[in-house]
Image (spheres, rainbow, N blue to C red):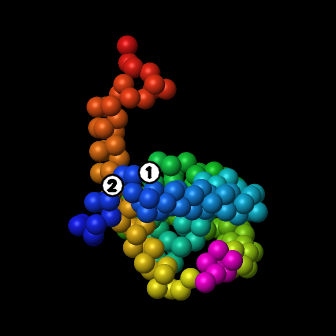
């Protein structure tokens, strides 16, 4: 994807500004949607995300905390904290991994699966409304974009953080260290 031209656009280019604005708005709308879906299950957004991630990942044998964290692009410690809450709520079960004695395999409990089974028709309706007019080819193109952004964002963040250090006096809201 390097050399594709997008990175060569001037930061103030209207097309780039519009794209970033819409990209940011889409992320915010997705967070609103995830909150509403989580509330429909009586869960927090984080619990809901972990439960849905496990629902997807357990289709493969032996879903560990690490595998779930990798799928969700979040820290394993965060997954562990949410899994512990979901386990207390009776929605997730943990078992020692047969493949790695240091790891724990995760799976949905009967109640966790039942809640997601009840959610599935709502998810279908939401997806129909959310993705109306988009093709599988559109989804695959956007998915490639998201994967690229996920992969390249740590480097872009490091650059931004270095730039923030260089321009420390440029942000009057940010206090200078003593």
For the C terminus, the quadrant is top left
Q: What stretch of residues is rendered in magenta?
A: 127-133
Callout 1 environment at 10 Å: few (<14), some (14 to 19), or many (20+)?
Answer: few
Say whether residue 125 is left or right of residue 22.
Answer: right
Q: Which residue is mark 2?
A: 10
**Is residue 139 depicted above or below 46 in this figure?**
below
Q: Residue at x 42, y 78 (%)?
A: 141
**Which quarter of the figure has residue 152?**
bottom left
- View extreme (left): residue: 3
Residue 110 visible: no
Q: Position of residue 139 (x, y in %)?
A: 49, 79
Q: Earlier in the sequence, mark 1 or mark 2?
A: 2
Q: Position of residue 87 (x, y in %)?
A: 63, 56
Say whether residue 61 is left or right of residue 155.
Answer: right
Q: Name the residue nearer the viewer: 126 or 2.
A: 2
Q: Name the residue nearer the viewer: 162 or 172.
A: 172
Callout 2 environment at 10 Å: few (<14), some (14 to 19), or many (20+)?
Answer: few
Q: Position of residue 68 (x, y in %)?
A: 47, 63
Q: Which type of secondary structure does the marked residue at label 2 adopt? A: loop
Q: Which type of secondary structure does the marked residue at label 1 adopt? A: loop
What label sits on residue 18 in the rendered view?
A: none
Q: Name the residue nearer the viewer: 170 or 134.
A: 170
What label sits on residue 75 in the rendered view?
A: 1
Q: Is residue 131 magenta?
A: yes
Q: Residue at x 23, y 67 (%)?
A: 3
Q: Residue at x 69, y 77 (%)?
A: 129
For the N terminus, the quadrant is bottom left
Say whether residue 88 is left or right of residue 56.
Answer: right
Q: Position of residue 32 (x, y in %)?
A: 66, 57
Q: Is residue 69 magenta?
A: no
Whole-number angstrom distance, CA of label 1 to CA of label 2:
34 Å
């Amino acid at each position: 994807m390097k050399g594709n031209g997008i990175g060569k656009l001037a930061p103030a280019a209207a097309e780039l500004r519009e794209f970033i604005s819409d990209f940011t708005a889409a992320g915010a709308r997705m967070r609103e949607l995830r909150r509403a879906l989580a509330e429909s299950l009586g869960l927090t957004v984080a619990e809901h995300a972990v439960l849905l991630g496990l629902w997807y990942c357990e289709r493969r044998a032996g879903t560990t905390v690490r595998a779930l964290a990798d799928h969700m692009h979040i820290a394993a410690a965060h997954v562990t904290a949410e899994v512990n809450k979901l386990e207390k709520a009776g929605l997730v079960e943990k078992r020692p991994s047969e493949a790695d004695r240091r790891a724990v395999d995760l799976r949905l409990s009967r109640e966790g699966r039942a809640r997601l089974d009840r959610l599935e028709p709502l998810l279908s309706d939401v997806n129909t409304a959310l993705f109306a007019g988009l093709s599988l080819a559109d989804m695959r193109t956007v998915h490639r974009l998201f994967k690229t952004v996920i992969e390249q964002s740590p480097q872009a963040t490091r650059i931004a953080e270095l730039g923030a250090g260089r321009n420390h006096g440029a942000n009057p809201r940010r206090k200078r260290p003593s």
